[in-house]
Amino acid sequence: MHNERAEALKNSITRQSQFNKAANTIQQGLPNPDPPPEMFAEDLVRGYRVDIWDDVSKTWHSLCQRSATYDLDKGTLVVDVDKEEGTVRLAATTSPDPTSNPDIIWLHETLVSWLGWSLCAPPPGRTIGHVEGDHSDPVTDASAEVPPGLRLRTTFAALPGSLPRLRYGRKYWIRARVADLASNSLELTPLDFGPEHSAVNARLYLRYEPIHPPAIALFKPNPATTETPAEGESMERMAVRSFNDTPLLNSVSTFQRTRRVAVQSRTTQRDAEQHGLLDRAGLVDASFFAMLAAQDNSLAEEKVLTAGPLAGGDPVETGYAVIQDGAQLPYLPEPLAASIAARIFDHPAFPSDKIIVIPVYAGTVWPDALPFKIEIYDAPGDEPRYDAPSRTLLIPLPKAARATLRLSVKPTRHALGLLGVWNWLTPAQRTQAVTIDGHTMTLEEMALQGQHWMLTPWRTIELVHAVQRPLITPDAPKISINRDEAATFALPTFVVACSVASTDRLDLRANWNEPFEDAAANELKNVSRTDHAFSVKITDEHAYAGTLEFLLQAPDLVRAGGRFHDRIATKLHEFHDTRYRRIEYWLEATTKFREFMPSALLTEGGDPTKPTETHIKVTGTPVRTWIPCSAPPPPPKCCTWFRRLAGFARMTRRPRAVGAVVVGFASTSIGRGMPRDTARCSPWCYRAPRSQVTRTTSRRDTR
């Protein structure tokens, strides 16, 4: 590292401009030229020759030694140099965009970065180039860049045996020798020049990347079959389904099983080499190169057609990684993954703090890591376990259960010592006790169990056992009605058994007879009315951050509707009037697993434009109750006066409010003015139950 390199480069450019100006003045032979500026050592620096010290060889090695071949004018003159030292120089770049500011120079603060090979010779193998015209990236042989017009071709190679091995867990120290404009520098010496103190100052080379968790692939039981994701599933969401179309099927186990394959994450040849996995007896084994060439592939990919987002739209093609049962990994696996730690959260019969350990190698060594299967099924009484002969993590899942599987690498103590983030901690900090989810352990214990996300991040897989209909029919034994004075709505409240795990919402529905006056036929009629009173969203308080709409009084026993709690949303049934009604209420529960059901259950006759919930809900028994009148009826209004017998009588309109006894004829003399033909006045009379009669007007008011 070189701090403030930008400022140093700016000052260097300024000084070089002064040198050029003075040189031009001298060459032009102008009289009385200014004296040339004074030069310092940094003004004569051409570059640096970098050396590295390691604690295995305990000697200094040059990272710039190389052999060279210089070809002038396409073979006119070829010069071979058996041994020379290159230099590491300033690398400043400008933007290739011609519209950008050419005066802006990009300069990295790092002077040099060593990745285990020579700094002045290309590594073995081919490189990926780039063609500006068509933006293609062809694979070519490594070659030095030569300025246009210069008929020179160079070939450089690192000297055999001149480079130390870069390995995690070893100690290294670095120094740089200055090379002047004539490429002169101090000669390489295997010992310290003096102030290096390499044995004391050497630093551990550590890995600062975490140990990556396993990846997930689709399972191929045979070459012709692939277990593709069904409705609602994805690569990291697995589901089995119980089609409990009747309540009797709630206790019948489903035969569905869903499987995925967990494969170790992929690493690179360089990473494997720096972990020392390509060494034998301290040397790189040449026989590994054939293995590297063979295991440089990705998992096979298959295209699967899935339903699109629009009803009746074209299916969407999605690519998934697949692996056949018993197949080996086609790539190099994670070097530090020796076993996998599996934890299951929110499982109703398995504690979340229990860890299932799955070995990565069973009678094999790196790079022959073995995948393992994840299988979910329905088996009451069974518990999650790892089956070693079949290499399968078996997870039984009860109906309507949602669990989370968390997979992470369980590192060894040696692997933990190679992680740079872990080595930031002091011994006291590593043994510090922490409490997470009620469990107390030290940071070291947590890390060794693969439960520290900074060191061993995990991959989560959602496990679902979907049911077609809710597991409990919402039969409310009683529905209480409250109605405020003059309110046009009622407040039904109920306590009902409800499967919180399998119910998405409760719908309160109602049916009653609505009387109305047929003016053309001059008679009263009844019309059956069916209404949706309100819905109650059934949520899990641990997974839902919104306002709850019900109160959980006991497991699977909810109280909802009306107004009974300040923190529970008020639910009401709007009638738009104040009249009395005799009414029947019932509850309908809809499944929480709609997205996991096939389209045939969600549509009418398979028509995607006609959605239905008939096949994914259960209906409770109707409960009869009464909606009280909340306001007195208005006084009757006079239609016309007519003379009858000895007095005058008037005809009044029948009030629209329910709950009073109304007589359409009145007389100025009680007992003498009432018509004897009661059939004539029956269309204008309405009699309500005695308990609902409300006094509205006095006799004097009706005259």
Image (spheres, grey):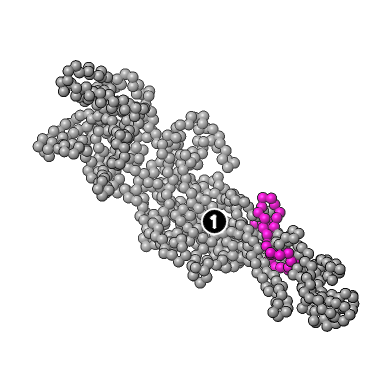
- As helix, strand or loop, the secondary structure at mark 1 comes to loop
Q: Which residue is painted at 37% across and 46% down in the image?
A: 266
Measuring from the top left, give residue 692's x and y in whole percent.
Answer: 80, 67
Q: Which residue is painted at 52% across and 69% down in the image?
A: 610
Amino acid type assigned to the residue bearing label 1 in the image: Leu
Depth check, front residue: 629 or 314: 629
Quarter where residue 171 is shown: top left
| Badge 1: residue crowd in 10 Å (few <14, some 14–19, many ≥20) | many
Q: Is residue 582 magenta?
A: yes
Q: Would you say 28 lies left or right of 583 here?
A: left
Q: Main secondary structure of the magenta part?
A: loop
Counting every numbered tag in the picture gives: 1
Quarter where residue 8 is shown: top left
Depth check, front residue: 420 or 427: 420
Image quadrant containing the C terminus? bottom right
Measuring from the top left, give residue 25's x and y in whole percent.
Answer: 19, 22
Depth check, front residue: 595 or 267: 595
Measuring from the top left, give residue 292's x and y in whole percent.
Answer: 30, 45
Q: Would you say 384 lies left or right of 315 here?
A: right
Q: Is residue 266 magenta?
A: no
Q: Which residue is painted at 67% across and 58% down in the image?
A: 571
> Disc 1 marks which residue?
397
Image quadrant containing the N terminus? top left
Q: Which residue is painted at 54% across and 46% down in the image?
A: 354
**315, above or below 648, in the image:** above
Using the rendered image of the protein, determine whether residue 68 is visible from the camera's viewpoint.
yes
Q: Residue furthest left?
A: 76
Highlighted magenta segment, given as a residue range:
556-585
